[in-house]
């Protein structure tokens, strides 16, 4: 509200500092501090952005190609493959992560050491190198022979998808093992004792009591891992798997629109990471049950709450 | 109760001479590394008896309680609950450790209530109470829910069934924890300083629930600093200090006319 009206009709305005009736004090109406620095910074940043936009407008970019190819069949297949390999590798990473975290925490020194070795190797070497090794496995093992159970040529087994899944999944398992271990260790020991005192076995305690509580600690970094995975999956183009990056760059090379197709790829990566960020938000909310007195509103609930407050004056 | 050389004239009506004690400890020792916590505990608790354990902190009361349901493993001596050795099976003169599954099965009959409640924070009050019957006894969910609701009513929290522990006060959490232990229909209840973490005005509600349990004939071992409760509800009182039972007997006798200097010193500080 402006100072002119404020002085004249103090009772009519709904100022935030309305003095309670009968109060001997007047609400403070001071001249606010002028933040000149903020204005200068805003102008500089906007100018820099304008220059950047101008630069792009002058570049030799055929924007039409970006629009044309955005929903191209090959690109869409690439998007689907990126999602598929990311979800599969993440699922594999989760299972391996829980397994190796439990092994690491177990009282058995052998499983503990094996888990340590696994994490040491797969976290200590680049995932790019691991992918190449899986893809070229046939150079050292011509056949995969699991005795009476299974036997086949390595080349036939190690398809691009399998190589990509093993490379990404095993690497992810090492990171997830550390995340899960931290989550399990964050659960208070009293929880295990209370569960044991009820007569629950170690496995029941882990499944019913410890892991659900560990999830609250596990989920935020796992969400980050998944978003990383969506982007890291671009590396599997090296094993000939036709995911988003490979699909778009192939088109780019054949149609001489290399940068345009990278823009297409970037747009899709942004879409995917945004969608899964929203999913992560709801998942975190689900596992916050019991740890907060009341759950925060979802964005949708906030919108609805705002709508009802907008409508309320009409009703009243 | 009583150390076993003592007669027990004033323990509630039932137990005549030959009744098997619910808990029997003989020369129980427990060490954590170099720290010798329990230095030969002898104790008997009869069925339907309420036995209160008192003593300064660090005297081994809680450790002894945790040995009874094998949350801690004893290093020497023998401990029986309802006639069965705790944590071991005796074949000839050799002891065999019980498997985890067997230990878990034994614990079903022993309820435990902790100083820090230890409710499961990701479950509502009623889910906390149902967890044992459904997961351990494989009870049908509907039946378990009905019984859990009745138990919550018994501890005065019928209207809090859907609340999460974080939404309850300390006293309410502790009463849910008691209901959770009772849901397993235990033969014996262990209370580890159940009111020590509570605001003073919430202690009464929890003690009332425990008093009700005692009146219903539950066998209880209570580590406590509530001398009033020990005097009114307890059938026996055990004073522990530095890992040994210094003195035991009827609460009014121990509290009113302590025989040992250490008991007198302790009581003069807390009464």
Image (tube, rainbow, N blue to C red):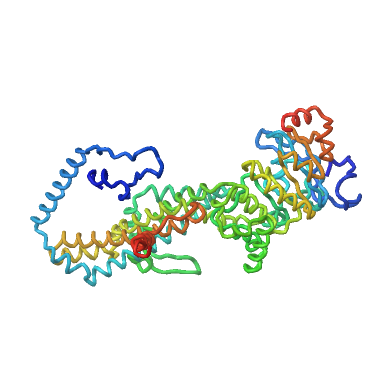
**Residue drawn at x 59%, y 55% as measured from the top left:** A205
Q: Quadrant of the C terminus of chain A?
A: bottom left
Q: Is residue B138 left or right of residue A43?
A: right
Q: Is residue B4 left or right of residue A130?
A: right
**Residue drawn at x 76%, y 28% as measured from the top left:** B265
Q: Is residue A147 visible?
A: yes
Q: Is residue B205 left or right of residue A169?
A: right
Which of these two is toward me, B157 or B126?
Answer: B157
Which of these two is toward me, A102 or A145?
Answer: A102
Q: Position of residue A78 (x, y in %)?
A: 27, 67
Which of these two is toward me, B203 or A260?
Answer: B203
| Farthest-out residue, bottom | A73
Q: Is residue A86 visible?
A: no
Q: Identify the image quadrant of residue A267.
A: bottom left
**Residue drawn at x 57%, y 55% as measured from the top left:** A209
> In the picture shown, does residue A260 fall above or below B20?
below
């Amino acid at each position: 509200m402006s100072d002119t009206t404020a002085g004249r009709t103090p009772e009519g305005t709904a100022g935030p500092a309305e003095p309670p009736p009968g109060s001997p004090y007047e609400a403070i109406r001071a001249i606010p501090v002028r933040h000149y620095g903020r204005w200068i910074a805003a102008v500089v940043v906007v100018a820099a952005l304008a220059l950047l936009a101008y630069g792009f407008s002058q570049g030799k970019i055929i924007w039409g190609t970006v629009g044309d190819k955005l929903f191209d069949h090959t690109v869409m297949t690439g998007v689907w493959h990126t999602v598929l390999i990311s979800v599969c590798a993440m699922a594999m990473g989760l299972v391996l992560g829980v397994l190796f975290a439990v092994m690491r925490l177990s009282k058995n020194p052998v499983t503990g050491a094996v888990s340590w070795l696994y994490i040491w190797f797969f976290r200590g070497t680049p995932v790019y190198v691991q992918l190449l090794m899986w893809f070229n496995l046939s150079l050292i093992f011509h056949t995969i022979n699991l005795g009476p159970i299974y036997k086949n040529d390595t080349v036939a087994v190690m398809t691009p998808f399998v190589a990509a899944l093993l490379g990404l999944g095993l690497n992810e398992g090492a990171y997830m093992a550390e995340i899960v271990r931290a989550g399990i260790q964050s659960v208070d020991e009293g929880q295990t004792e209370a569960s044991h005192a009820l007569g629950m076995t170690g496995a029941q305690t882990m499944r019913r009591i410890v892991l659900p509580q560990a999830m609250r600690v596990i989920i935020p970094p796992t969400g980050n891992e998944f978003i990383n995975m969506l982007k890291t999956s671009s590396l599997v183009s090296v094993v000939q798997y036709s995911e988003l990056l490979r699909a778009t760059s192939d088109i780019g090379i054949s149609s001489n629109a290399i940068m345009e197709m990278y823009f297409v790829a970037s747009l899709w990566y942004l879409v995917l990471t945004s969608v899964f960020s929203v999913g992560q938000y709801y998942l975190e909310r689900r596992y916050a049950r019991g740890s907060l007195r009341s759950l925060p509103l979802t964005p949708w609930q906030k919108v609805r709450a705002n709508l009802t407050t907008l409508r309320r004056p009409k009703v009243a | 109760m009583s150390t076993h050389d003592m007669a027990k004239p004033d323990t509630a009506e039932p137990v005549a001479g030959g009744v098997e004690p619910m808990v029997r400890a003989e020369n129980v020792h427990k060490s954590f590394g170099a720290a010798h916590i329990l230095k030969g505990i002898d104790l008997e608790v009869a069925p339907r008896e309420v036995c209160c354990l008192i003593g300064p902190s660090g005297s081994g009361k809680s450790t002894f309680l945790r040995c009874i349901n094998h949350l801690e493993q004893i290093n020497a001596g023998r401990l029986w609950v309802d006639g069965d050795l705790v944590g071991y099976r005796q074949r000839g003169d050799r002891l065999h450790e019980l498997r985890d599954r067997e230990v878990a099965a034994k614990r079903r009959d022993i309820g435990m209530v902790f100083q820090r409640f230890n409710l499961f924070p990701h479950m509502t009050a009623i889910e906390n109470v149902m967890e044992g019957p459904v997961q351990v006894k494989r009870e049908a969910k509907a039946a378990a829910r009905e019984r859990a609701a009745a138990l919550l009513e018994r501890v005065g929290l019928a209207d809090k069934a859907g609340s999460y522990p974080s939404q309850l006060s300390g006293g309410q959490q502790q009463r849910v924890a008691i209901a959770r232990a009772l849901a397993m229909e235990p033969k014996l209840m262990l209370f580890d300083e159940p009111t020590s973490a509570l605001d003073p005005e919430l202690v009464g509600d929890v003690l009332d629930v425990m008093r009700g349990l005692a009146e219903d004939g539950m066998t209880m071992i209570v580590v406590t600093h509530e001398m009033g409760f020990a005097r009114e509800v307890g059938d026996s009182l055990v004073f522990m200090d530095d890992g040994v039972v210094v003195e035991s007997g009827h609460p009014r006798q121990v509290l009113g006319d302590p025989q040992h200097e250490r008991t007198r010193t302790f009581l003069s500080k807390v009464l």
